Image (spheres, grey):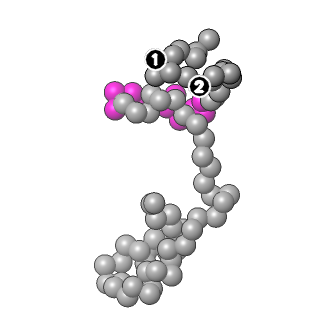
Amino acid sequence: MPAILDEERVTLWLDSSTNETAQLQSILLPASNDLLRAISVSNRVNSYKNNDSRLIEEASISEPAAVDRQLGLFDDYSE
């Protein structure tokens, strides 16, 4: 999990003279729910070859069609 710090706490975090564990522990708090947002993105983000603004566009997630039986290893459930 990355450390997400506000501007005031960044200085303390980057200060090499700060070596008190308690002091650093006090700024490592979970981020508020309104700060971060999870969105679905294209699987294009998985390749370093792709580097354009479409990588951060929200992608829709389509659910596979309901199947009345258990799928086999090589079954194709796409329509």
**Looking at the picture, does residue 55 appear above or below residue 30?**
above
Nearer to the camera, 78 or 71: 71
| Residue identified by numbered label 1 | 74
Amino acid type of the residue that numbered disc 1 sits on in the rendered structure: Phe
Task: Please tell me how crowded label 1 is: few (under 14), some (14-19), or many (20+) other residues with Cα within 10 Å.
Answer: few
Which segment did they paint magenta?
A: 48-59
The C terminus, quarter of image: top right
Q: In the image, which is nearer the foreground, mark 2 or mark 1? A: 2
**Looking at the picture, does residue 18 appear above or below residue 1?**
below
Q: Is residue 7 magenta?
A: no
Q: Is residue 68 left or right of residue 28?
A: right
Distance from the alpha carbon under mark 2 to that under mark 1: 12 Å
**Looking at the picture, does residue 17 appear above or below residue 56?**
below
Residue furthest to the front in view is: 69
Q: Is residue 49 magenta?
A: yes
Nearer to the camera, 12 or 78: 78
- In the image, residue 42 lies at what x, y percent? 52, 29
Magenta span main SS: loop
Amino acid type of the residue that numbered disc 2 sits on in the rendered structure: Gln
Residue 70: mark in rendering: 2
Question: Image point 58% across, 64% down: which residue?
Answer: 31
Q: Secondary structure at mark 2?
A: loop
The N terminus, quarter of image: bottom left
Question: Image point 41% across, 74% down: which residue?
Answer: 13
- In the image, residue 12 lies at what x, y percent? 43, 78
